[in-house]
Structure formats: structure tokens, C-alpha cells
Image: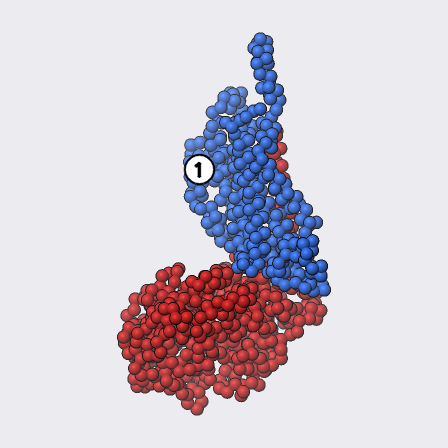
Chain colours: A red, B blue
Amino acid sequence: MKRNISVLLSLMVLASLVLAACGSAATTTSATEAPATMAPATEAPATEAAPTEAPIPDVSIATFDGTSLSVPAEECNGDYIGAIQSVVATDENTVTFTLCRPDPAFLSKIAFSPFSIYPSEWLETASATDRLEKPIGTGAYVVSEWSRGDSITFTANPTYWGDAPEAETLVFRWSSESAARLLELQSGTVDGIDNIGPDDFDTVRNDSNLALLERPALNVFYIGMTNTFAPFDNQGVRQAIAMGIDRQRIVDNFYPAGSEVASHFTPCAIPNGCTGDDWYEFDAAAAKAKLAEAGFPDGFSTKLYYRDVVRGYLPNVSTVAQDIQAQLKENLNIDAEIVVMESGAFIDASGTGSLDGLYLLGWGADYPHITNFLDYHFGAANPQFGNQSDTYTNLLVEGAQIGIPADAESIYVEANNAIREYVPMIPVAHGGSATAYRADVTNPQAAPLTNEYFAVSDPGGRDVFVWMQNAEPISMFCADESDGESLRACEQVTEALYSYVVNGTDAVPALAESCTPNEDLTVWTCALRQGVTFSDGTTFDAADVVATFNMGLNIASPTHVGNTSTFFYYDYLWGLMKKPGA
Amino acid sequence: MTLQSDTVAKLDPEILSLNSVSLWQITWHRLFRRRSAVVGLCILGILVFIALTAQWLAPYDPTRSMLDVDPPQKIKARSAPCIHLLGCPEDQPQHLMGTDGNLRDQFSRLLYGSRLSLMVGFSTVTFAIIIGTVLGAIAGYFGGWWDNAIMRIMDVLLAFPSLLLAIAIVTVLGPGLINALLAIGIVSIPAYARVMRASVLSVREMDYVSATRALGGNNLQILFNRILPNALTPLIVQGTLGIASAILDAAALSFIGLGAQPPTPEWGSMLGAERNQVFTAPHLVFYPGLMIMLTVLCFNLIGDGLRDALDPRLAQLS
């Protein structure tokens, strides 16, 4: 008996060893190496972040006295890199913005929801929870309850200055699974949903109870490379990869209708977006030759990083990643090991330029201007692709200061061609996405800037409009948020000086009746709308505008606190009022 | 003496003949008489056959996208199964279970997936049994301080829900199949350690153990030659059932993206990748789910059968 047992045991061990050997042959070696690859990826941001978090903190250079927020005028030519020199309440209903340099996109930027106006008293006195969960604004709805993890309920603002909202109550719900969202819509428990699954377009179209709305593709999906890591420091390698990926095949097979192959980084709907030469044609043989010329005739091994989240620019991330992996192998003999990262860690690592392989990322328009695409990604200060090239960074600075698009065209032709030549990344697609509503909803929207405004939509005469999106808002203090799911919720409650026209991209007056520039576009004078009250009963005036910008820009202000207190969009679009410490 | 043995022989010749039959022969005999266990063994046999011959059975490379095929085939991503025998037009390429989101042959991926699942099941359980047995045996045999230290650690491990603990371990080690195996192996150790310790405790006091000790056997000899072989039965049952839960755990980890990484054909990750297509392309969710179910079912049936077959209280000798 004893012998039998030992024979049985050794047979079992033997069987598992054989199976393990078979299995690992089929799995590729990726699995075994995973821990080694993950470690640097997650640790990298920490090491990269260290130099930027210098021992000497930045110093505030702002002065604020309740009606005026400013930095000394001479700082505009010094270390201060921000755009706003001062925000002054000239009188109760007039605010003047003085800029350090001309900004033709001022109105498009000021209309963006993170720059919504809050009451000055509330900014000073609101508790931390109220600040994040029950913001006070002038919008058509007020937050009545946020049941964390479940839903947000909004009720109509009785003192709203504009037309009363169609539905008395608005409810936001969320689900990360597109199949679950569609199921809720089909069963009638929600009135509208965001991001239809790419395979469900026809299901919705063929259902007479539902309406499908395609959202214009104001976004870009790109394959990033950091040129401080070998072999991506070699321009020939980057060009070879750019030629060696069949982007048409990706769009044809893995993107929904309404998507297009990216001929340029910026979508064509944006003025000057598609000037200059089209992106490289797919040519596997030429790509292979180019790679050989660059010194890699047999390809090389690298990694392909991505985060497993659905965005309008990349609705099928895992499928697309696997197709790119297959194409790299087939066309260029590049072995790319797939590494899936957690979303936050991925954004940190790619943003600081510490990913040593290819990575899949994209960008959706915040405001419809070419600077929102090119300047953000290819500005000299952005390390996400490694070292930027002077051939285009200088052109971008120059182009950003020209007001009339036609005048800037020649500059952007040159800049786009320089980017094409340098290949900091490979633009792949402008992804179409879609919303769906019950057929009886009036004024259904699929906003190009993903900022649907539900006050103008009537849910077939029902009292409650229920909207279901991808994810729960992070917080509703949107001055300090950058996530689209949060911004959409804020859009219902707060308003900025301008707003985007419903379902469009043009900036139209909201809390301001008009903002007019001086000759050289450096001073913008805004006449405010009168008789507007916040939902807490206080009256809206020029001091609220100054206090709001003080909260966002003045790092020394006690009101400069939020969910993370990074104030991403204030920093990115205007620049915080600070300079490096001595 | 002679009289006595004569009496025994006369009284019950069947018992005498059984003396030459080993426990394992009896077990096999009993196992084959249980219909459910036979079904389980059949399924396992088929699975092992598929796993060993996947490269000959599969019509395509499991990681090859049909977009690479030259000339290009007339086929879309997530297309429904096309079987020529059942009336699918001849000009369409045959895909028994359709294609997945990356236009790979689902049938081929499913076949290769059996290798991974069986490998996962056997290797994690073998790992856990080896470690668990050693720990349990030490705890049970030496008792006292050893027992306390080892079993309290096992209690702590048992206190966590096993899948959560596995997720925590994978999060620390990083996603990947090998790390997932390690995690599942670690969380299954306590079950085996407990079973082993309990068996050792009961066997330790048996007369034949005392006899060996009296004859001068040292601890190692007693443990490995006398106690272990006689404490092994419950461990085998536990191990067979454990394979089922290990496969299920690995599939769950892969489903949430912590186990096998794409493009590895693993049933759990195939299921996870296509979970949003449950209405538009149900075949992509149905078949991997079915395979996981069948595999787990077969190990459960075999495990149950073995338990009954090895249990002396249920002995029906004839």
C-alpha cells in the first residue's frame, strides 16, 4: 500500500510538471516576467516626482483684497508662467481680466465648467463635505441628495434666472458596463445613457422605443512613446512604427460607426486641426526597411502599456491593444508584452514620461481650440513623450497668440509637419461614441464636449429624468476636478461666465452678458448679468467672480482647497499664480 | 492455532480472499461503481486528452487574428459560429465557435484554455498539498509550541475570504498567471494543513506507531513511513475537491484582469474580455463559461466519489 501511495504521489507531481511545461509554452513568457515589469512602472512616478517636488516650495505672488486679484505686472516677463495678470471687479457688474499675453481662445476657455462661479461667502464658510458634495451655483438644478455609490438627485432651482428646467427632478446614475446601461434603458428605468457599446449601435437603431445619437469625434487616440528610453530615442524606429501599423484596420474592426482614422493629431472639425501633410500611409515593407535602417533588422522586445477603462476615444482598449501587439509582431517583428496598469498609476507614469515602452492613451477636447490638443501635448514643458523638439514647440507658442484661425494656418501647417517628422506619438483614431435615449425624450443630446445639459430635455412628460453614465462623479467641486463624469454633473448645477451652446462647441454668454477684448486681446472686460441669485439666496456680483478665481489661482488663499487641491484645469489653462521658491 | 485458522477459513472465505486486495484496488473498484464519479472521470479524461493534443486539434493558432490571414477572409469581429455541416455557406471560413473580439478562432482558444486550467488546478494544489502536509504533519506530530505557532498562522490565513486574500497577494506581486497561481496556492495551504494535522493526531496514538517507536525508529521514520501513508486518504479527497476551487479562483482572477494576461487563451479572461457582449455575441461568453463549469464539475464529482470510496464507514466490501 505504501508503495502505491508514493507512486500515486509522484505521478501527480509528474503530471502537474508536464502540464506546467505545456501550459507555459502556450502562454508566452509574459506571465512569468510580469512582476518584474510592474515594479518599475508603479515605482517610477515616485522617483520621477522627486525632482519636481523640490525641497523649496513654490511661492505665491498673488495679492487679493476682495475685489481685485493680481500679480505684479513685471512678473509676466519673469518666472511667472501663468496667463492671468489680474482679475478686477471694476464695479458691481463688471469684471476685467488682464492677461500677460494675447489669448484668442479666452472665451472658449472661460466657458469651461471648472471655471464656474461660486458665491464668495460660501467659498469661505462651506464645510469640506458640503464643498465636495453640495456645491452652490446659479444653475438650473440644485443637488438635493448624493447617495454615495448609488445615485445623485437634483431638483429644479426655484430661483433660476433662465427658463425653468423641463423635468422637476434629475437623477444621475452610473454603471461601468455598457451592457448593463443598455439593459436599464431598454427596461425603461433610465431615460438616457452614455457610451453605447460599439456592438450595440444596431440594437439601439433597430429599437423603435430608443433613439441613438452619435457624438462627433472631438478626440484622439494615440500610441505614445517616450523618446528618453531606447530604442525610442531613435527617430527612425519611431517612424518605422508609425508606418508599420495599419490604423485603418483598427478603426474598421474595433471602432463604432462615426469614427475615423486620424490624419493628424487634432480632429479636422477644429480650425487648423488638419493642416499640413496627412499621417504616414501604412506600408509594412517600407516600415520593415526603415526599422532595419535604424539598426533593428530583427525587431526588438518592448512593452505595451494601457489602462483597462472605456473612453470615447478608445471604446475597446483591450481588443485594440491585442491587435496592435499582433501587428507589431507581424509587420515589424517587435515583441510587445502587454502590461495592464491601474488607471491612476498609468496616468502618473505616462504623464511623467516614465513608461519605457509603447502606451495607449487619448485625449478628448476640453474646449474646441487647437491649443487644447497641440499645446498641451507638444509644449516644451510636457515630459510625456520625453524630449520635445524645438521644431514645433516654438511654432506652437507663436500660433497660440494669433486670434483669427486663417492667419495662423501657415504656422500650424509647419507645426503639424514637424510633429509628423519627429513622431513623438502615433495618432490612430478619432473615436465616435454615442448616447441613447428613450424615443420620447425631447432635445436628446450627444454633446461633442461630453457636457450634456439636461435642463432642456423633457423626458416624455415624466417628472423625473434619469441619466446613466460610465462612472460616479469623484466630487462635485469641479474647480478641482478634471474627470468628465464629474464635470457633467457639475454642469447641471453651476455656471461659468460663458457656456457652450447646447449640443455644440460655440461659447455663448451665460453669467456674463458679454466679454469684449481690447485691440491686442490682452484685456477682456466682462459685463455681468444682473438680478441673478445663487441657490443659497445670495446675489451674484463681480466680487463672486474675483473670489472664485482667487480660490482657483491663488495658492496662498485659505479657499484654495478641494478634493486633491491640484486645481488641474486652473493650472493647465491659466497657470497658478506662483513662481519657484528662491 | 490451526484450528482457529481453519474456522476462519470455513466461516468466511470472502474475507480471506480480500486480504490479497489492496486498499487502492478496493477504492478503484468502488469508484467505478459510482455513476457520477465515472462521469467525472470521463470528462476529466476528455479534458486531459484535449490539453495534451491541443496543437493538433486546434484549427488555428489561438493568438492569431484572422485579419492576418492572406487573402483576407470575409469575416467580422465576434461573428457567430459557422459550421459547414450545419448549412453555413462554403465560401465563409469555418469557425466552430465563431470568432472573438480580435477575430481569433474561439474554438482554438477554448482548446488551448484547457491546458492552462488543468495546469492551474494541478500545480496549485500540488504546491499547497506539499507545503500544507509538511506544516500539518509537524504541527500534529510534535504538538506543543510548534502546533500553536503553525496552526495560529493557518487560522489567520483561513480568516480571510480566500479570493480576497488571493487578490491582495496578486496586487502586491503584480498581475500575471504565475503570480495568480502562487496566490491561489498560498490561500489553499491552510485547508491541507488542518486536514493533515487532524489525521496525524489520530494516527499518532495507534499501536503500530508505538511499536515502531519501541523498535527504535526515529521521528522522521515514524512520520514518513508510519504516519503519513495512513493519514493520506482525507488529503487526497480534499486535494481533488481543491483542484476544482483552484480552477474557479484562477478563472475569477483572470476575469478581473489579475490572472492570465492577454492574449493568453484563458477561460476566465476570455469570459471577462467579452462580458459586455453577452447579448450581442453570446457564444463568446457561453463556451468559456461552459468549459469552466464542466471542469469544476468533473473534479467535484471525482472528489465526492473518492470520499465515499475511501470512507471505511461507508464500506460495502462486497
- The kind of residue on which mark 1 rests is Met
As drawn, A118 above or below A48: below
Examine the image and state in which quarter residue A76 appears: bottom left
Q: Residue furthest front?
A: A208
Q: Considering the numbered disc 1 on the image, is that residue within a helix, a strand or a loop?
A: helix
Near-viewer residue (B95 or A299): B95
Instruction: Specify few, some or many for label 1: CA neighbours under 10 Å numbering under 14, 14-19, or 20 or more.
Output: some
Q: Residue at x 41, y 83 (%)?
A: A99
As drawn, A419 above or below A173: below
Q: Is residue A561 left or right of residue A373?
A: left
Q: Is residue A406 left or right of residue A245?
A: left
Near-viewer residue (A77 or A320): A320
Figure quadrant of the N terminus of chain A: top right
Q: Please provide percent x and percent y for residue B33.
A: 59, 31
Q: Please provide percent x and percent y for residue A116.
A: 37, 75
Examine the image and state in which quarter residue A325 appears: bottom right
Q: Is residue A215 left or right of residue A114?
A: right
Q: Is residue A87 left or right of residue A296?
A: left
Examine the image and state in which quarter residue A200 appears: bottom right
Tell me if residue A373 can be seen.
Answer: yes
Tell me if residue A85 can be seen.
Answer: no
Q: Residue at x 57, y 45 (%)?
A: B294
Protein chain holding label 1: B
Near-viewer residue (B200 or B265): B265
Question: According to the image, label 1 marks what residue?
Answer: B151
Number of numbered callouts drawn: 1
Q: Residue at x 46, y 84 (%)?
A: A104
Q: Please provide percent x and percent y for residue A225.
A: 58, 68
Q: Please provide percent x and percent y for residue A64.
A: 32, 78
Q: Residue at x 62, y 47 (%)?
A: B115
Figure quadrant of the C terminus of chain A: bottom left
